[in-house]
Amino acid sequence: MTLPPNVHDAEPIPEAAKEAIDALMQSGDLFRYTAPQDAPVALLEAEFAELLGTKYALAVSSCSAALFLSLKALGLPRDARVLIPGFTFAAVPSSVIHADCIPVLCEVGENYRIDMADFEAKLDSVQAVIISHMRGHTSDMDAIMALCDARDIPVIEDAAHSLGTTWHGKNIGTIGKVGCFSFQSYKMINAGEGGILISNDADLVARAVIMSGAYEHNWKKHKGPHGDNSPELEEAFVRWQNKLPLYNLRLNNLSAAVIRPQIPELARRVRDGLANHDYVAGRLNTSPHIDVPAPLPPEQRAPDSIQFNLVGLQEHEIRAFAAAAEARGVKVQVFGLSQDNARAFWNWQFLPETFELPQTRDMLMKACDVRLPVRLTRAELDVIADILLAAVGEVTGPMPVYGT
Ligand SMILES: Cc1ncc(COP(=O)(O)O)c(C=O)c1O
């Protein structure tokens, strides 16, 4: 029998990283602004912008830093209200507070996507929006952009989990004014920590670059598309020179050396991750007590985990299901049931205002989360699906068998 797989380790970092890291160890050149040009961080930015099809990219220390800098670069005044989904990671409202703004939470549906009625109802009271594509589930970006564009409200895409996801064939992270990605270990590209911000807006990027810690004239090492000089970016840098605080949220060359060789692996990881997810989803959906929400039609997902709702189960049965799965070797996180969960909005007690989101709360009390790293084999996926189905069967009784 195949044992339950280890779902915590990421894929090995490609061998090519070792050579680049050795060279950096030899030279000691770890700071992104020491080399006159082509530092690993600068090369990463050029490669990432090209991969996603945007003009500019700024690599920083985390996705949280990218979100914070995006809000700062928008020039929002103190206490500006920023709409975020009620289902996201605590880092998102935290970045809003870090930027001296006030998070406003909106309802999320059973399919983990933003509830458009609540979004629209709250939109006129905010000055910016962060769309967290939580666990890579894309909200209705057509409706969101139409509503926000009509009001001239800037949209920041929190694409921490969405690298490789597309919407009508367009890369997630390129639809709003700015997109933010994470290189933390449980993401498609793993550097332990790290993040990147992308945008086509030269003024916004220049502000973010300076505030990320490009002191004095280090901004001259930031280029435009294909690593070429960009006059509009240079003009923006000159405009903002000495006018902005420096928050020092830079990425170092070692992290870039770990990230860059993973970029050519991305297409395969996305393909395998989606195939794995859809295979397990198909098996889980055979249970009347499990529902894996379908993607929205324009969305092509890039998952490395699976989320599903338990249907018709009481709270004690949901707890019993999670315990039964864990006893068999598969850890299930029920977002709303684990103590102090950072994705349950009622635990964000640092917010200046509180929000009642009954629909989101209801979803979080039955929504389950299981990691599915893209390297898992079909046999390992079967072990996970078998365990989850057996655990739900243990709680609800065996599945009905319909004879002829
Ligand atoms: C939805 C979401 N946004 C943002 C972040 C923050 O990413 P980072 O850890 O790179 O700051 C996370 C972290 O996992 C996340 O889940």
Image (cartoon, helix red, strand yellow):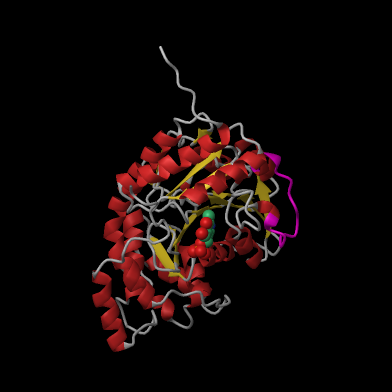
The question of residue 329 being in magenta is answered with no
Image spot of residue 270 (x, y percent): 34, 49
Spot the residue most to the front. Answer: 1
Residue 32's x, y, as percent? 38, 79
Predominant secondary structure, magenta span: loop
Between 133 and 219, the one lying in front of the other is 133
Which quadrant holds the C terminus?
Answer: top left
- Residue depicted at x 26% and y 75%: 18
Residue range highlighted in magenta = 347-360
Q: How many marks?
A: 0
Left or right, 110 with reference to 229: right
Q: Is residue 356 magenta?
A: yes
- Viewer-proximal residue, 176 or 31? 31
Residue 131's x, y, as percent?
Answer: 55, 50
Tell me what residue is drawn at x 35 percent, y 71 percent. 256
Is 55 placed above or below 249 here?
above
User: Residue at 53% across / 37% down in the picture?
Assistant: 394
Q: Is residue 399 above or below residue 148?
A: above
In percent of width and height, residue 293 lies at 49, 36
Above or below 397: residue 321: below
